[in-house]
Amino acid sequence: KHFDRSPDTNELFWFAAPPMNTARTPPPQHSLTYLHFLATKRKGAGSDAMDVDGEAASTGLSSRQHTVAPPTVGEILQATMNSASTEHL
């Protein structure tokens, strides 16, 4: 009743892919107020822009401190092999 059927066998038509002639939906349209908010947020100016990092962004300090990564297992083994080979010489 709601789907296309074969007139001979009354079986439903099945298709391997969606129809090719579908209408495209238009992209979302944002308001000018929201676009202005985004522009001020990207520039970093404006007190009404959301501050993601809290106080750290306003002071110029990053909340993530750069740390030195510990040596990998391969580096530790290489250093051990080098020290063992120099001790026995």
Image (cartoon, grey):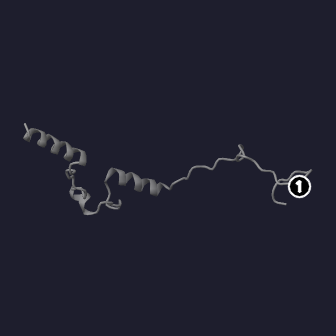
Residue beneath the point at 17% across and 42% down: 81
Mark 1 neighbour density, 10 Å: few (under 14) some (14–19) many (20 or more): few
Residue 89 position, x and y percent, is 7, 36
Q: How many marks?
A: 1
Residue 21 position, x and y percent, is 72, 44
Residue beneath the point at 33% across and 50% down: 43
Residue type, mark 1 in image: Asn
Looking at the picture, tell me which residue is in the foreground, 32 or 53: 53
In the displayed structure image, the side of residue 13 where residue 22 appears, left or right? left
Looking at the picture, tell me which residue is in the foreground, 1 or 89: 89
Looking at the picture, tell me which residue is in the foreground, 31 or 22: 22
Residue 70 position, x and y percent, is 21, 51
Q: Residue furthest front?
A: 88
Looking at the picture, tell me which residue is in the foreground, 7 or 32: 7
Residue beneath the point at 22% across and 50% down: 69
Residue 31 position, x and y percent, is 50, 56
In the displayed structure image, the side of residue 45 where residue 77 appears, left or right? left
> Under tag 1, what secondary structure?
loop
Q: Is residue 69 above or below residue 49?
A: above
User: What quarter of the picture does the N terminus occupy?
Assistant: bottom right
Provide the residue designation for mark 1: 10
Q: Quadrant of residue 47?
A: bottom left
Q: Residue furthest right?
A: 8
